[in-house]
Image (tube, grey):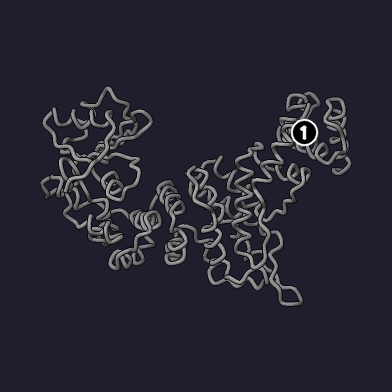
Amino acid sequence: MKIELKVPKYIKKIQEKLLENGYECYFVGGCIRDTLLGLKVNDYDISTNCDTITLKKLFSKYNIVNNNGEKHNTITLHIKGDNVEITTFKHNDEETPTIEVDLKHRDLTINALAYSNEIIDITGGIDDINNKIIRANDPELRIKEDPLRILRVLRFASKLGFEIEKKTNDAILKYKDLLKNVSAERIKHELEEILRGKDVYKILEKYYDIIFVIIPELKCSYKFNQNNPYHENTLYEHIINVCRNIKINNNLEEFALLRMAALLHDIGKPNCFSIDVNGVGHFYGHPEESAIIATNILKRLKFSNSEISKIVYLIKFHDSTINLTKKSIIKKFSHTPNQKEELFYMLLELINADKLDHTKYELIDIEKVKNIINEIKEEKQCLKLSDLKVNGYDIIKLGYKGKKIGEVLDYLLDLVIDDKIKNERDSLMAMALNYRTLNDKKDN
């Protein structure tokens, strides 16, 4: 079977170099799968009978970005912003390395496709693509080789909307606890890919047992009755629906952060649950409790400090009420880390996604909020810390150190937003001095 595989010229040069030196060269995996599906191809992986030591010599003038190539029989070339993986044919010690043997060792049939002049498919990958099925090659063996493949199965089911074949389904559930032995960094990557998928809600709904292995803190949300007139669903069902309500976003990083925040936004509710005299359930303080639990989860999964800051902010303020007035918007915006407009709009999207699963709700008109913020900027009103007529250096001159500098600036911003003082240097410096006096009184 022939296909039109559109390969950039700079990647074709890699293929030509291998062929010129007498080696086999096949494009494999995702680039073939996505071409058959009519999707945009983002990655080009190459498989060859050339060993990694020779590969390093052949491509010594390229930027080789991984240092463990010989260990994993792979080298990665960074070219024009893209990473191209070149892997020596996968095989066992007793097997002769060929492209056919290599394909048998790949995780899923839809990824076990190779192309040179025509497609090589020995595992039925094309049929599985046509029938929209996720099937592992010898599921139990592949998963025992690398338990991360459990999440890869879920990732492609979420991304493509395919059904998971029964033997593969049974294997990922049977060996789910092996995920405890997989590094946090690898789990993080696959979890983000699962969350970006169009069918993430189906995965969270059907494979909760697997999700609970990597985030055990979510277990208590399963079948948790919220006993609240605004919530007709269990807590875990609500979490799934909020994830589903986050709209598909072409900004993949932003999209993954939003869905991660949605997944964890109510994780602290069981710890805050109380029932009033009328039998109605309440969750006082749950955004703050959820933010604390989420911080520990995100650190464990090796999210960056920047990612943690953004996700925790979204969780902490997801229950906020925002009125369409300049003062209300400025007040809420001032809590946004580094006063990033994009992050504030992400918060509004999470708030709306959460509200959509309430029995009664009124959504925030995000476009109106954007217009009001633009008006505020045009009027040069004080919207963020950098708009203040004093800065950190001014506060340092008054004798403040460390965290106190930020506290004083936040205090001054609140005063200006509340129209208690004008945004003028002399007034701000005087109030900054007054802040110390107020704190000294509290301490005494």
Q: Residue at x 77, y 43 (%)?
A: 326
Secondary structure under the numbered disc 1 in the rendered image: loop
Image quadrant assignment for residue 16: top left
Q: Where is residue 198 in the image (x, y as percent from the top left)?
A: 44, 55
The crowd level at tag 1 (other Cα within 10 Å; few <14, some 14-19, many 20+) is some
Position in image of residue 259 (x %, y %): 52, 52
Q: In which quarter of the image is residue 352?
A: bottom right
Instruction: Answer above or below: position of 46 versus 289.
Output: above
In the image, residue 264 above or below residue 360: above
Q: Which residue is under mark 1?
A: 381
Q: Which residue is drawn at 66% across and 37% down?
A: 339
Q: Position of residue 102 (x, y in %)?
A: 18, 48
Question: Which sits in the foreground, 140 or 83?
Answer: 83
Query: In the rendered image, which quarter contains the C terminus?
Result: top right
Nearer-the-camera pick, 31 or 372: 372
Task: Please count the marks in the image.
Answer: 1
Q: Residue at x 73, y 44 (%)?
A: 329
Q: Quadrant of residue 68?
A: top left
Residue at 35 percent of width and 33 percent of height: 82
Residue 138 left/right relative to 212? left
- Toward the viewer: 376 or 122? 376
Horizontal and vertical percent for residue 160? 37, 55
Give left or right: position of 331 versus 102: right
